[in-house]
């Protein structure tokens, strides 16, 4: 029974993947043909993802906006040459990570706190009291500072895994490193994050 | 698994990214090892902390307007080709033409570098040779050893051996050791 469920699920997954690939090919073809709505669709689908990744990687709103703008400019220029060697999502993640690396090599990431007004809207639990909110806000600030203090390769791996929730295989494709390296970077990144969180109450 | 579980396996187990055999082995070890359980709990807390961070589900509205301006500027810079300054350059010089031009320029530079230098050297050497022969001819004419040759100058370039013999005779004439009677 389990085997039947697994097998059936795999077939359904493959069918979904094929449909998604067709939709992406169609989007790329429309963009190449000069259909402006194709890029608008792509922006609507991926802008939140790109901005969040840029924000977590760079650590500041202005830096994240710069990165996201450059990422979408690159997508606009090169989307017509996308050949479908990976999914569009992986391709866009890769561009974003590369752009974050380029931006990061020009300046050190800035740690931001949850109280920073430049961060944008934060989703909070409406049932939480003021003390809870203050305490959680302080905790989030500590986590963000600890994250931005990590070296870029660990930060990349952790953000892609624990915030973007990519699989190890997807992270390997995005970062351009073997699966074993992904596993090792996530583990070491978590260990360093744990040490920092425990060291700074 | 008697030794402690490696960090990468503890972390991978939290993500469900271990092979089935690895996962079984780690689970067995954790049941009997408090140190590994504690370490795993620390990693799990770090993982949870990141996952609880507030999400940014949408990009700020400002990004779209910034992007619109940047795209317009990009179109102006590239002439709509989307290649940046390279596109502008390529439209001025098509790749084939630019390639041929580069090779042509390289060949021309080589020729200019080699030919004039050789020509200059040849010319200077020829001038030096000519001046030498002219001096020798004037010398002969002065000594009246070969009046005809000295006047016409045509035998001056007839051959090194003849020239050498004339020089020897000139020196002999000067020294007076072998002066021959005129015919």
Image (cartoon, rainbow, N blue to C red):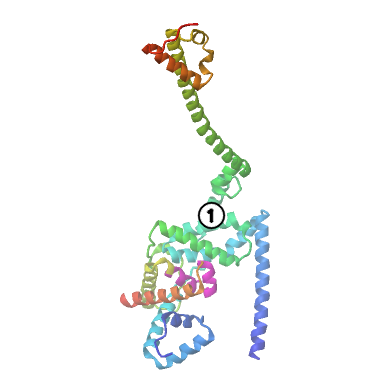
Residue at (40%, 14%) from the top-left corner?
Answer: B172
- Look at the image and say whether residue A159 sits in the magenta stretch: yes
Residue with the mark numbered 1: B67
**Residue at 38%, 82% in the rendered image:** B42
Relative depth, front residue between B89 and B119: B119
Residue A62 in sight? no
Residue A12 in sight in this render: yes
Quarter of the C terminus of chain A within the rendering: bottom left
Q: Is residue A81 left or right of residue B176?
A: right
Q: Position of residue A102 (x, y in %)?
A: 45, 58
Q: Position of residue A46 (x, y in %)?
A: 56, 64
Q: Give above or below for B92 relative to A191.
A: above
Q: Chain of mark 1?
A: B
**Front-lying residue, B161 or A178:** B161
Q: Is residue A117 magenta?
A: no
**Quadrant, the N terminus of chain A:** bottom right
Horizontal and vertical percent position of residue A84: 63, 64
- Which picture quadrant has residue A198? bottom left
Nearest the eye: A17 or B167: B167
Q: Identify the main secondary structure in magenta.
A: helix
x, y percent for residue A32: 66, 55
Q: Which residues are magenta?
A: A154-175
* Front residue of B139 and A20: B139
Are there few (<14), some (14-19), or many (20+) residues within 10 Å of tag 1? some
Quarter where residue B111 is shown: top right
**Residue at disc 1, secondary structure:** helix
Give the residue drawn at x 47%, y 6%. B182
Relative vertical location of residue B164 with respect to residue A97 in this rendering, above or below: above
Image height of B108 relative to B179, above or below: below
């Amino acid at each position: 029974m389990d085997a039947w469920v697994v097998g059936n699920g795999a077939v359904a997954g493959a069918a979904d993947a094929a449909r998604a690939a067709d939709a992406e090919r169609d989007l790329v073809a429309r963009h190449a043909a000069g259909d402006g709505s194709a890029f608008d669709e792509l922006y609507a689908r991926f802008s939140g993802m790109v901005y969040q990744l840029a924000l977590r990687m760079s650590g500041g709103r202005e830096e994240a906006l710069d990165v996201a703008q450059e990422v979408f400019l690159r997508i606009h220029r090169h989307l017509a040459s996308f050949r479908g060697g990976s999914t569009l999502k992986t391709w866009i993640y890769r561009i974003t990570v590369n752009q974050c690396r380029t931006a990061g090599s020009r300046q050190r990431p800035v740690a931001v706190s949850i109280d920073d007004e430049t961060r944008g809207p934060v989703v909070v639990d409406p049932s939480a009291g003021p003390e809870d909110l203050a305490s959680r806000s302080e905790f989030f600030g500590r986590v963000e500072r600890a994250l931005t203090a990590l070296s870029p390769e660990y930060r990349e791996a952790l953000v892609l895994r624990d915030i973007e929730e990519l699989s190890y295989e997807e992270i390997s494709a995005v970062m351009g490193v073997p699966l074993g390296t992904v596993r090792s970077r996530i583990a070491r990144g978590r260990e360093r994050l744990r040490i920092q969180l425990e060291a700074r109450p | 698994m008697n030794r402690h579980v490696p960090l990468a396996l503890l972390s991978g187990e939290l993500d469900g990214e271990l092979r089935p055999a690895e996962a079984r082995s780690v689970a067995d070890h954790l049941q009997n090892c408090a140190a590994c359980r504690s370490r795993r709990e620390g990693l799990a807390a770090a993982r949870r902390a990141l996952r609880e961070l507030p999400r940014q589900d949408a990009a700020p509205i400002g990004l779209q307007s910034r992007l619109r301006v940047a795209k317009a500027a990009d179109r102006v810079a590239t002439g709509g080709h989307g290649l940046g300054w390279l596109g502008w350059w390529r439209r001025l010089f098509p790749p084939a033409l630019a390639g041929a031009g580069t090779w042509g320029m390289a060949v021309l530079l080589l020729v200019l570098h080699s030919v004039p230098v050789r020509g200059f050297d040849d010319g200077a050497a020829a001038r030096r040779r000519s001046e030498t022969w002219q001096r020798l001819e004037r010398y002969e004419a002065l000594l009246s050893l070969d009046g005809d040759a000295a006047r016409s100058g045509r035998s001056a370039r007839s051959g090194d051996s003849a020239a050498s013999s004339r020089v020897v005779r000139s020196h002999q004439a000067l020294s007076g050791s072998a002066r021959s009677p005129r015919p």
